[in-house]
Structure formats: C-alpha cells, structure tokens
Image (tube, rainbow, N blue to C red):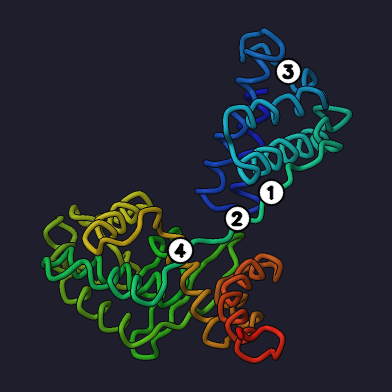
Amino acid sequence: MRDLIDRYLDHVAGERGLSAHTVRAYRGDLERFLAFLARDFLGKEPRAVAPADADALAVRSFLAALHRDGLSARSRGRALSAVRGLFRFARREGVVEADPAAGVPAPRAGRDLPRHLRPGEIEALLEAPGSEGALGARDRAILELLYAAGLRVSELVGLDWRDLDLSARVLRVLGKGGKERMAPFGRAAERALREWLGEWEGVRAAAGDGGGGRDGEPVFLNHRGGRLTDRSVRRVIDRAVERAAVAAGVHPHTLRHTFATHLLEGGADLRAIQELLGHASLATTQRYTHVDIDRLLGVYRDAHPRARRR
C-alpha cells in the first residue's frame, strides 16, 4: 500500500500538475488512511497492508474515525477524495479489481460562511506593519497585494518579479491545476510594491545573492534572502492582527475572502469575481453571495410597506 501511495502522489504531482500544497495534503490523508487500516482495522503492520485489504467498510470506518477525531466535513471530504483518487489510480494500473471507495458517499459539508473583514478592520490591518525598515516594507506589500488581488497565499509566495507589471498594475499568476490568469491590483498595492522593491535588492545582496538582477527572482524574500514560505506569510498576518487589535481568526485566506466580499458589495458581477479569483466553478464563488444579506435586509425593511416598523 505504501508503494501505491508513493506512485499515486508522483502521478498527481507530475502528470496532473497538482500544487505542492495539495500533494502534501493528500499525502497526509493517505498516510492517515494507511495507519488506520493497519492499526485499527486490520491489526497489521503498515508495511504488511496490501491495496486489496481495503474494502468499502474500511473506507466508511476510516471516515467515521475522522469524525470521532473532530475533523470537519470538509476535511473528511478531502480525505475521501484522496482515497478515491488512490483507488481509481490503482484500478487503472491493475493493482485492484474494484474500487472500495466508489460507493462511499461524501460527508455532507455544513454551510459555514467565509470569514471576511469589514472596511474599518481591513484598513487597520493594512496599516499595522508601520515603518520597520526593509521587512516592514515587505509586510505592507504582502498585505496590500493579498487584499488588492485576491491571491491565494501559495500564489503570492510563488510570484517572481517578471510576473508583475507595476506600471500597468497587473500580475500574472499560476493558480490551482496550473491555470494561469491575470490579476489587476490598485495604486495602494503598487506603491507598497515599489517601496518594497527599493529595499529588495539590499535584502537579496545581504544574503550574498545580489548583482544578478531581479528578473525571474522571487518577489517576497525572507530575512536570509530566500523565497518566503506560506508559513512565514501566516506569521506576518499574525503580527499585523495583533498590532491592529483585529478579532482573532484572521489568516491569509481571510484577505482573499475579504477581496471577494468587497467586490460583491460594490456591485461586481459574480462571473467577473469568479475570473478574478481563478475559481474553476461558479458554485465555489457563489459562497460569497451571503455578504449582501445584511444590505438586502436593510433595503427590504426600508422599502417594503409591510416590513416597515410602526
């Protein structure tokens, strides 16, 4: 089974072009599935588990165990997706005759609404880095660009300078599944990026990598001059949240949700927001339609004769 998992992950990374983040998530889910099969379901050592040892009951029991462990329906659904993909691959490769996950229903996800920041909150967050030299300029550029362009954090840290046209205020980004899109950004983000660019070469040179020009180089650097990681962006936002005294629970994706929310509240078309976010399906973008509920209720109460207070 472990050999099958490795082959499958090589397949989705190389041939299907899934992001490194998605592949890591799938690996974690499949390793957890293998551990459950070995320890809890079969009573074997993991190295002794064969793909044919798994059946539909094993898959259902695995999902039940994840539920008992407190995983959300979304996390359980992702784990099931990983297991389904593994066994579809195994069947195509002739490793198993039947797919044990094929008839297992996906967990029903709740209707949790994306967290987003109100205008006052986002302004406080964007101003939080203050003036802290080179890395302060970097942090301001990170926050401004996440909010201005609605980027995923993996897209942000993957940016190279050649992907940005500062004069036109537009960037090229490689999204999920290797899908390329163009994303505009505003003057505030442009100013923050130019300020960071003025510091960038010094940070790169301090790491011993200066002098080669910036074309093709990562936009966002750590203090050692290397490409910034997803985890480092999380820390940047944590510091800004603490300084701005914004409610807890803000993470990099919150700025993407806020981007979409504010566009919709400003009257943007849902299809346009879908393109800007790089969503493959409009159904994913439609999660943001909740944001106008308060405004619509206000309009209704003010305009409908039977809703007015007396």
Quadrant of residue 222 within the rendered picture: bottom left
Residue 29, image x, y percentages = 60, 34
Callout 3, which amino acid? Answer: Ala
> Which residue position is annotated with label 2?
112
> Which residue position is annotated with label 3?
50
> Which residue position is annotated with label 4?
155
Secondary structure under tag 2 reads loop
- Compared with 266, 244 (above or below) is above
How many marks overall?
A: 4
Left/right placement of residue 12 relative to residue 153 reads right
Q: Does the residue at mark 1 contact the one at mark 2 (Cβ under 8 Å)?
A: yes
- Quadrant where the N terminus sits is top right
Left/right placement of residue 223 relative to residue 30 reads left
Separation of residues labelled 4 and 1 (CA atoms): 26 Å
Label 3 vs 4, first from the N-terminus? 3
The structure residue drawn at horizontal position 73% and vertical position 46%, both measured from the top left corner, is 108
> Which residue position is annotated with label 1?
109
